[in-house]
Image (cartoon, rainbow, N blue to C red):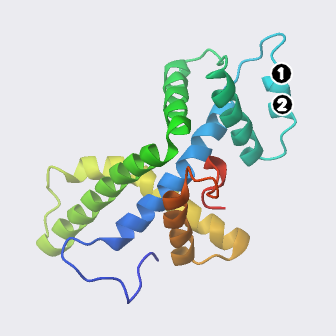
Amino acid sequence: MLTEARDPDEREKVVAASRAAALVACSWPRAELTALSYRVREVPGDPLPGKLAACASNRERAAVIAAELESRGGFPLVRSWRTASDAAAIHRMRELLADPRRVLERVRGYLEMSLRRLYRCRNIVLHGGSIGGIALPAALRTTAPLVGAALDRIAHAHLVADTPPLVLASRAETALRMVGDDLGPGLCDLID
């Protein structure tokens, strides 16, 4: 889905992993901001819950949370077993909002390394016949959600806008190059 005949055939060149990493990196900000939008605690006098209730889509909710983090730096969270995880998400999003290009390139690099590791494990299984490799369980554990996120983006783009996977990957790569630019996409609109 993410390769074509014109792709370079260099050793160690895993084009599909790079393209999938771009897709996941572009979808991460909105997913994280949307999840945070459902963790806001209602506090008397705070207009944020009302703003979120007025949103018609998750994209709007993510944009409201991004604006709130830029202006206030944080917001009250619902207390639960997830509070520490939510606080870490707020920290990640504040870092992303402060320097989107640097953070997204770093995230893309991490994603690409994980997906390339999966590809190497796949080669060991298919070409070497070994399923006992020490890296295989860790690679499967860390990359399964990433592959799922990439496939989710591809399926959504196909079903909603009939966008082919390579076109979507190209848009993601372009968005990553333009993020942070005045004419570039916002963090909630990287691959839309």
Q: Amino acid at mark 2?
A: Lys
Residue at disc 1, secondary structure: loop
Residue at (64% x, 30% y) in the render = 70
x and y, in percent, of residue 136 in the image: 22, 54
Residue at disc 2, secondary structure: helix
Q: Nearer the viewer, residue 75 or 84?
A: 75
| Image height of 132 relative to 3, above or below | above
Looking at this rendering, what residue extends furthest in the bottom direction? 5
x and y, in percent, of residue 114 in the image: 31, 53
Disc 2 marks which residue? Answer: 51
Disc 1 marks which residue? Answer: 47
The answer to whether the residue labelled 2 contacts the one labelled 1, judged by CB atoms less than 8 Å apart, is yes
x and y, in percent, of residue 73 in the image: 61, 23
**Viewed as shown, does residue 185 lie left or right of 94?**
right
Residue 113, image quadrant = bottom left
**Viewed as shown, does residue 103 lie left or right of 132?**
right
CA gap, disc 2 to disc 1? 6 Å
Q: Amino acid at mark 1?
A: Pro
Q: Nearer the viewer, residue 63 or 35?
A: 63
